[in-house]
Image (spheres, rainbow, N blue to C red):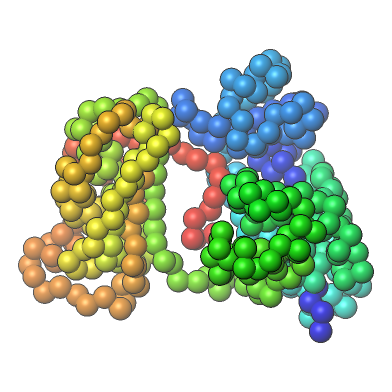
Amino acid sequence: MTRKILHIDMNSYFATVEQQANPLLRGRPIAVLGSKAKRTIIVASSIEAKRLGIKTASGLNEALKICPELVVIHGEPRKYADVTRRFISIFEEFTDKVEIFSIDEAFLDVTKTANLFGGPEKIASKIKRKIRDEIGSWLSCSIGIGPNKFLAKTGSDLEKPDGLVIINENNKDNILQNLPLERFCGIGRAISRRLSLLDVYTTGDLRKCPIACLKEEFGVISAWKLKQIAYGLDISPVISWREQKLAKSFSCSRTMNRDITSRDEIKKQLLFLFEKVAKKLRDDNYWAKEAGFWFRFKDFSGHGKVFRLGSWCCNGLEFYGLSLKQLSQIHLHQPVRAIGVFAGRVQLSVNVPSSFLPEDKLNQQILETMDSINNRYGEDVITRGVLTGVKLKEVVSGMGRKKF
């Protein structure tokens, strides 16, 4: 049975949500910023701003040069998450297989339910109408319909805003051959540059390129994936967001408002980030056996360290203490622009043996008490004294592992 997959992409999502909420913004070029930090980017521009050339990931100063009348808005994550909850609820009226691809994108597998609603094209039209009627008339989405996720997503990218594109076995080859490789999900600028070294610029070139050449450049797995892209092949299933996979790692990072050179300040930021990533672990009931950190310097070069833990851990202070030895081995040849940390080799807490040492039990009680207070009264209401006043910027994109 040929699968029937929809990919739904909300158009200029954060920006149109803001325009829906505030009628005075409708029809005007607006830009939603990634955070309230000084160093931030535009994470969404309205359809009107895009027509002027203001794109996602543009710098604010650059955008204001293009359009001095640009309306700048600080994003509100909870507002967007609420709208996402509402359109996911609409999608689930047509199938139980809804995979959240990002905060503004989703795949729907309607193979078994399409006939109940008159076919996938009718489902797409009904979803568009329901979004307008039940969430807001200013919101629109582009929908691609195909026999697999790759072709469905390719279709949704072809007509924006408010498009509806069907890709099937009859028109697949014509559509794929007419598109630049960078338009395909999975082929970014870096891969495109490497493909150009093999004289591969189009889908036709990619089909003709010997698999041996691709293997030599990209490795076996990536080479076969590129061949699959060339022919529009994809067997990956649509997995309901309710069937969440086990986590493999947790991470947290931040770009500083200013470049920093002080090791004391770097240490404070490391402790802060390790506390954040440890809280993520505890919230999702995970422990880690590995951790690490990375720096991005002023010239955007980077350096990182990974270290194994002697025992399972979900305590940011322990991660931090072990990281200090690694930090001492790094030569900070330039000011640090950004810092990130991660916890890896994670395991669900139910599978981690409990420690009987009194000091471990006491530390765990302290963490549970801190989490209980912060979960009830707000993030960082209680924190370690050295971190008083240190805050993580609020970002507007992403939903984390807990979608709703």
- Residue 385 shown left or right of residue 167 in the figure: left
Residue 244 drawn at (x, y percent): 52, 70
Residue drawn at x 74%, y 28% is 53
- Residue 206 shown left or right of residue 294 in the figure: right
- Residue 334 shown left or right of residue 254 in the figure: left
Vertical relation: 32 (above or below) 207: above
Q: Residue furthest bottom?
A: 1
Q: Is residue 353 visible?
A: yes
Residue drawn at x 82%, y 79% is 2
Residue 38 drawn at (x, y percent): 46, 25
Q: Is residue 388 visible?
A: no
Circle count? 0
Residue 15 drawn at (x, y percent): 69, 36
Residue drawn at x 28%, y 38% is 269
- Residue 358 is drawn in which quadrant? bottom left
Towards the viewer: 234 or 44: 234
- Quarter holding the N terminus? bottom right
